[in-house]
Image: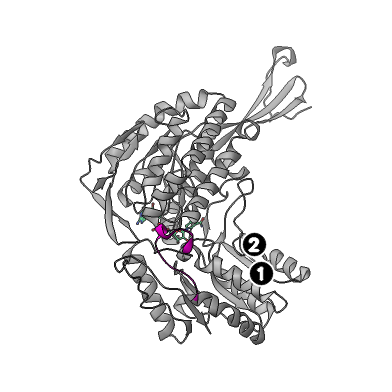
Amino acid sequence: MQELTHYINGEHVKGTSGRFADVYNPATGEIQATVPLANAAEMDKAVSFAVTAQQSWAAVNPQRRARVLMKFVDLLNRDMDKLAEALSREHGKTIPDAKGDVIRGLEVVEYCIGAPQLLKGEYTDSAGPGIDMYSMRQALGVTAGITPFNFPAMIPMWMFAPAIACGNAFILKPSERDPSVPLMLAKLFEEAGLPKGVLQVVNGDKEAVDAILYHDVIQSIGFVGSTPIAEYIYATGCANGKRVQCFGGAKNHMIIMPDADMDQAADALLGAGYGAAGERCMAISVAVPVGEDTADRLLEKLIPRVEALKVGPYTSGNDVDYGPVVTAAAKANIERLVQTGLDQGAKLVVDGRNFNLQGYEDGFFVGAHLFDNVTKDMDIYKYEIFGPVLSTVRAQSYEEALGLAMDHEYGNGTAIFTRDGDTARDFANRVNVGMIGINVPIPVPLAYHTFGGWKKSVFGDLNQHGPDAFKFYTRTKTVTARWPSGLKEGSEFSIPIME
Ligand code: NAD
């Protein structure tokens, strides 16, 4: 069995804490590797290397830093197949989906190649007599990120690409469930020319996270994962004086208006609800048809499509729509929530229970489930299931549908399917959710816009990637300069006012 490592100061380093976690192949249910779980001393070691590396990295001019990112993009493309295979083997998602995971991260690296432009400061000539004023953005120092299992390539890159482009060092604590790709990314970035110690991977669980939260030297923390952990990290990180941004869970609604094309809506729900086995923070988990007739027409199209979904291991190539969920515990949690749906009166119109795949009986596969007649008080509506389970909540009017999305505690993404521009515009303007799709079921913004939800899906002020990332990973410094020829005789005792 493979023993994975940390990646510290350019070396694969074995864990010394004596604690390890098992890493599974979700398709077979086998343990394929162990990953070390770092303690505070191991984290501290990485931080001291990061301090030294960051000072020289910040002194490299932004254009040269950008060139390293350019080369990194080339290497990501060169190794795309290898990365996708390693990702699917630990996560379970299909190979095309795993490539998408790498590509959506790579696109943020491409955006960060614009660092020389994005880091340009502001300048006011002659702000006063003989006085010039300028602002610059400077790196924070040592930064850290804690990432979830569901996008082991994309989300780490969303964090470390802008952090490093800005001149910071970055310590990544990836999910202990699929740590191989983050380790590969760190090595590849160094092959591209990144100096040792600028990007390090320290594997672990709560102990490693706490070592980050309480470390005096670490300046900022990015977190993506479930909401309870996001709340903990935000509160503890802020209390320890760090800059923190946390992105949490989701329950994304898709509203289907009576004038929508039902074939398009059903196709969209299929990909958005069941792709990646529903393990996406932008997955649609609630379909809200408006009107009984719309609901009936939608379900007539949707049910046969859901029944025909092909579930299997990534090794089956393009013949598979989605793979297993990540762990046996995730599978058990989905099954438990499905049972609560039945107990609380929802109607299971596609029953994915007892799904069995010949030859993969020990894999963590979950059949596709579709519920009808779901109501607001049910657990399957209130909680994030993070599995291939779509709930239909029938709304009698557009206002009721809008109210559902607005009243839910999560506000990551939402979508509306309609041909009516006025309704779509009204929805986009009024709904209190961060990312809106109009006839687009998974509206994940591209790298040069920003990504982030509202309500309990986010803690902190700035979004991920896009211009916000360059604000999050830098501090502004403003200089007011006057040369001796502009100086007046004597002292000023009142607050200076520009003349
Ligand atoms: P998770 O919260 O279990 O884990 C995320 C990270 O936190 C991991 O690195 C993990 O090691 C660490 N962690 C876990 N328990 C901890 C604890 N008690 N103390 C400190 N750290 C801890 O999330 P997950 O299961 O890996 O990912 C799925 C979740 O992430 C879902 O809720 C999903 O919606 C969310 N997610 C959100 C976004 C977004 O941008 N909003 C994107 C992707 C995933």
Q: Would the CB of label 1 be found within 8 Å of ligand 1?
A: no
Q: Which residue is drawn at 69% across and 74% down?
A: 261
Asked if the residue at label 2 sits under 8 Å from ligand 1, the reply is no
| Residue count near mark 1 (Cα–Cα under 10 Å), binned few <14, some 14–19, many ≥20 | many
Viewer-nearest residue: 289 or 303: 303
Q: Can you tell me which quadrant of the image ligand 1 is in? A: bottom left
Q: Residue 237 appears at what percent x and percent y?
A: 43, 48
Question: How many discs mark residues in the rendered view?
Answer: 2
For the residues marked 2 and 1, what is the alpha-carbon distance in whole angstroms?
8 Å
Q: Is mark 2 on a helix, strand or loop?
A: strand
Residue drawn at (45%, 34%) of the image: 189
Work out which quarter of the rendered image holds the C terminus and state it: top right
Give the labeled residue for mark 1: 416
Asked whether the residues under the numbered discs 2 and 1 touch, taking CB atoms below 8 Å apart as contact, a structural biologist would say yes
Instruction: Locate residue 372, reporting x and y percent.
Output: 53, 83
**344 sits left or right of 71 in the view:** left
The residue stretch that appears in magenta: 308-320
**In the image, residue 103 above or below residue 59:** below
* 135 w.r.t. 293: above or below: above
Nearer to the camera, 207 or 176: 176
- 363 or 56, which lies in front? 363
Q: Is residue 141 left or right of residue 474?
A: left
Give the quadrant of residue 433: bottom right
Q: What element carries label 1?
A: strand
Tag on residue 77? none
Q: What residue type is labelled 2?
A: Ile
Is residue 104 visible in the rendered image? The answer is yes
User: What residue occupies the far top of the structure in this picture?
Assistant: 485
Which amino acid lies under the numbered mark 1 shown in the image of this protein?
Answer: Ile
User: Which residue is under mark 2?
Assistant: 436
